Image (spheres, rainbow, N blue to C red):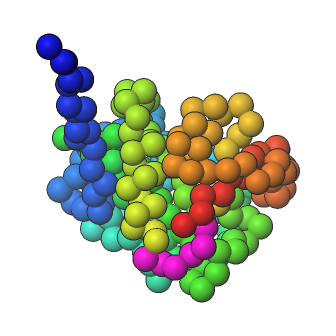
Amino acid sequence: MLQHPPPEKESPLQLIVPDRAHLDGYADALRRGWSPDNVRVDEAPREELARIESDPVAFVASLDDPEAKAGPVTLPDGSMVPRMPGYRRWMWDGEFCGSIGFRWQPGTAALPSYVLGHIGYAVAPWKRRRGYATLALGMLLKDIRRHGLPHVDLTTDPDNLPSQKVITANGGVLVERFAKVAAHGGTETLLFRIPL
């Protein structure tokens, strides 16, 4: 008798637009030590928790900012740069799993030197090894196509093999190895490109 493999279990992962209904899960992850920013790992959670406590409605609204109205961005060296249009989506499987964001310059795939890529993501440590980053990137790429960019760029540290696997699983190709600008510490990083 011919046996068929069992059907693949569908992932419960969704990308959701940040909202007040899911904010407690996000804030809890920040309190547990997760950071949405893999460069400003320690500062970002403290700053975001303070903003949530001060004005949760404004905080949630700031995460979906396609017109770059939220004001300047602080780089790791403390310098301030203009914000680019962008938005974040929360990874959700019944509870908060992580965050993925997209930023761009309208009409071009080019990025300022201080922006390390179009997409950044961070999965909560207790939700890793489930394929969520790979799935979330694939879902976000479908949405990004509406912006008409020919490609998106992502960067990762040379020793961050899990992130490299996430990018290549979504069609990313290594373009170059380069040194980050001084504002990001000048360390070496890898640039990957995903054609759209």
Residue at horizontal 45%, vertical 34%?
A: 33
130 inside magenta stretch: no
In the figure, residue 58 lies in which quadrant?
A: bottom left
Query: In the shown orientation, is residue 123 left or right of residue 44?
Result: left
Residue at horizontal 78%, vertical 57%?
A: 183
Query: In the shown orientation, is residue 69 left or right of residue 53?
Result: right
Most extreme residue toward the left is 1
User: x and y percent of residue 155 in the render?
Assistant: 67, 51
Which is more toward the observer, 55 or 6? 6
- Location of the C terminus by quadrant is bottom right
User: x and y percent of residue 53 in the render?
Assistant: 32, 55
Most extreme residue toward the top is 1
- Location of the N terminus by quadrant is top left
Q: Is residue 94 above or below residue 110?
A: above
User: x and y percent of residue 11 in the render?
Assistant: 26, 39
The mark tally for this picture is 0
Which is more toward the observer, 129 or 60? 129
User: x and y percent of residue 75 in the render?
Assistant: 68, 59
Which is more toward the observer, 97 or 50? 97
Q: Is residue 37 visible?
A: no
Which is more toward the observer, 162 or 91? 162
149 inside magenta stretch: yes
